[in-house]
Amino acid sequence: MKNIVTARAHTNIALIKYWGKADLALNIPTTSSLSMTLDQFYTTTSVAFTQEPSDSLILNAEAVDATRVGQFLEMMRGKYGDFPKIAVRSENHVPTAAGLASSASSFAALTVAMFGLLDLPKDEQEMSRLARRGSGSASRSIFGNFAVWNKGVDDQSSFAESFHNEDIGLSMIVAEISAEQKKMSSTKGMQLAQTAPTYAAWVEKSAHQLEEMKKAILHADIEKVGLIAQDNALGMHEQNRLCREPFDYFTAQTQAVIDFAKTCYRQGLLAFVTIDAGPNVKIITDRASERRLLEKFQAEFPDLTFDVARAGGAYEYL
Ligand code: ADP
Ligand code: DP6
Ligand code: CO
């Protein structure tokens, strides 16, 4: 039996979003979703058996609350049989809880590491199902490049799979507006959004957008990818503003970056946005426009930090 296993998984950014749960306990989503895995942002997680009385988490060299990780490990014990307590040590090479998908890379890395520690067969479908229980978006971070999470109807049928394991030349310029932890977690935010009177219409539109998005990716049509992704993401944030207890992840700077991307597009540059559960904006473009667009944004927003991310790889054992 191994004593310690280390795994890495990358974050992913959804081009068609997961924003709602049909089953809260199982993380069965209301929509299927599609994402690109990023090369620049990832989590590295080590797991080891311990004699300590509880599961523990050290995140970025600091002992932190292990409730969510503990619940995940308890779920694994229920599924695969009891095992000793686990000491988890994790490094986020991505801001934590800032809408840059730390829950995706971290629960994917934890799942993969635990599969190694428990010597479970490295079945990607099963890993994706498991990661989904930790955080829905983590189901997609098992895979490199593009992944589709088919929503399914129950635990068995809800998992992600590789969609197009190719780099189609899509670049994302990440505008880091704030690395602060959000006040409204994704888990809570999406449940509120589901109370919006327009939510059912967003879900219905999303199914159509997913099919169009798949075609656009297969044709490496980045303009089409960007247009659909932007429409889908802005629609998601609309639900937050229209729900029972309205809230908004956007700041004034978020809106300014979105507006500037739209200006760039009108000027003939490929520039579209997608935004997750946080103020940071990911600008979708292609390889040829990446440099020019980055320079334009840096000149317009000298106080912001920008990172360029491209399509990244699947999980790895280290
Ligand atoms: P994000 O936009 O970063 O995905 P979420 O609200 O979805 O934000 O999830 C953030 C939560 O994910 C954190 O509060 C924490 O519970 C969990 N998390 C993030 N990174 C790690 C990690 N490396 N190990 C374990 N749990 C993590
Ligand atoms: C806006 O996967 O973080 O990033 O399943 O409750 O952990 P939980 O939520 P999470 O939600 C991600 C929401 C999103 C869109 C997406 O990644 O599809
Ligand atoms: Co998350």
Image (spheres, grey):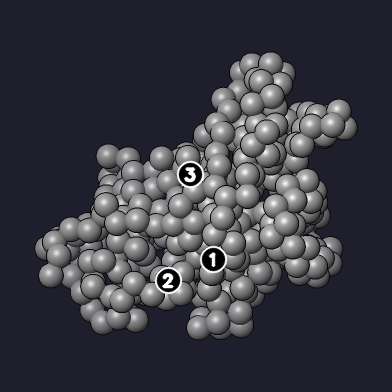
Which of the two residues, 145 or 275, is positioned nearer the viewer here?
145
Which percent across, then down, holds residue 47?
24, 58
Tag 1 secondary structure: strand
Residue 267 sits in which quadrant?
Answer: top right
Task: Name which residue type carries label 1.
Answer: Ser
Tag 2 secondary structure: helix
Alpha-carbon span between mark 2 and mark 1: 10 Å
Which percent across, then down, holds residue 84?
18, 70
Q: Residues within 10 Å of mark 3 (few under 14, many from 20)?
A: some
- Determine whether 263 is above or below 312 in the image: above
**Quarter of the rendering occupied by the N terminus:** bottom left
Whichever of callouts 2 and 1 sits on the residue coming sooner in the sequence is 2
Q: Is residue 181 visible?
A: yes
Q: Which residue matches tag 1?
A: 162
Which percent across, then down, holds residue 166?
56, 55
Which percent across, then down, holds residue 215?
74, 62
Apparent side of residue 39 relative to residue 236 in the rendered image (left or right): left
Apparent side of residue 242 relative to residue 171 in the rendered image (left or right): right
Contact (CB < 8 A) between labels 2 and 1? Answer: yes
Circle on res. 139: none
Circle on res. 124: 2
Circle on res. 39: 3
Q: Residues within 10 Å of mark 1 (few under 14, many from 20)?
A: many
Task: Name which residue type carries label 2.
Answer: Glu
Whichever of callouts 2 and 3 sits on the residue coming sooner in the sequence is 3
